Amino acid sequence: MTGPRATAPGGPVGSVARAVARAARAVHWYTTSLLGDRDYDRYVAQLARVHPDVDPPSAAQYWRTRHADADAHPGARCC
């Protein structure tokens, strides 16, 4: 069927499933970004671009340094 009443492939159920999957991906992206899960990966990528001759620290060392800096220099945070 063509025209204004045509439905998406998979019918209305497929359309709803795609919308739910898209919403789940958006929630996952938001929560991982909000909680900082991607910070180490972004740091390593930026370090490779700006200082290609420097070896990046391990993920554990990055987080230790980041938390130590946050404790030493408290800023605007909830607790």
Image (spheres, rainbow, N blue to C red):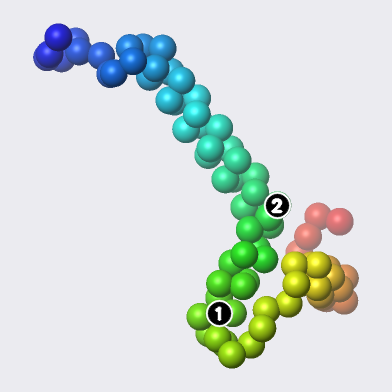
Q: Check the picture and name the quadrant holding the C terminus.
A: bottom right
Determine the CA span between mark 1 and mark 2: 23 Å
- Residue 26 appears in the picture as rendered: yes
Q: Check the picture and name the quadrant holding the N terminus.
A: top left
In terms of sequence position, does the residue under pointer 1 or pointer 2 come before the other? 2
39 on left or right of 7: right
What residue is shown at x 47% (from left), y 32% (from top)?
A: 22
What residue is shown at x 63% (from left), y 58% (from top)?
A: 38
The local secondary structure at tag 2 comes to helix
Count neighbours of disc 1 (C-alpha within 10 A) and say few if under 14, some if 14 to 19, many if 20 or more.
some
User: Identity of the amino acid at label 1?
Assistant: Ala
What residue is shown at x 50% (from left), y 29% (from top)?
A: 21
**Nearer the viewer's eye, disc 1 or disc 2?**
1
47 versus 5 height, above or below: below
Mark 1 — residue?
A: 48
Q: Residue furthest bottom?
A: 53
What residue is shown at x 56% (from left), y 72% (from top)?
A: 45
Residue 32 image offset from top left, x and y in percent: 65, 49
The local secondary structure at tag 1 comes to helix
6 versus 59 height, above or below: above
User: Identity of the amino acid at label 2?
Assistant: Leu
Mark 2 — residue?
A: 35
Q: Quadrant of residue 52?
A: bottom right
User: Contact (CB < 8 A) between labels 1 and 2?
Assistant: no
Q: Which mark is residue 21?
A: none
Q: Residue furthest left?
A: 3
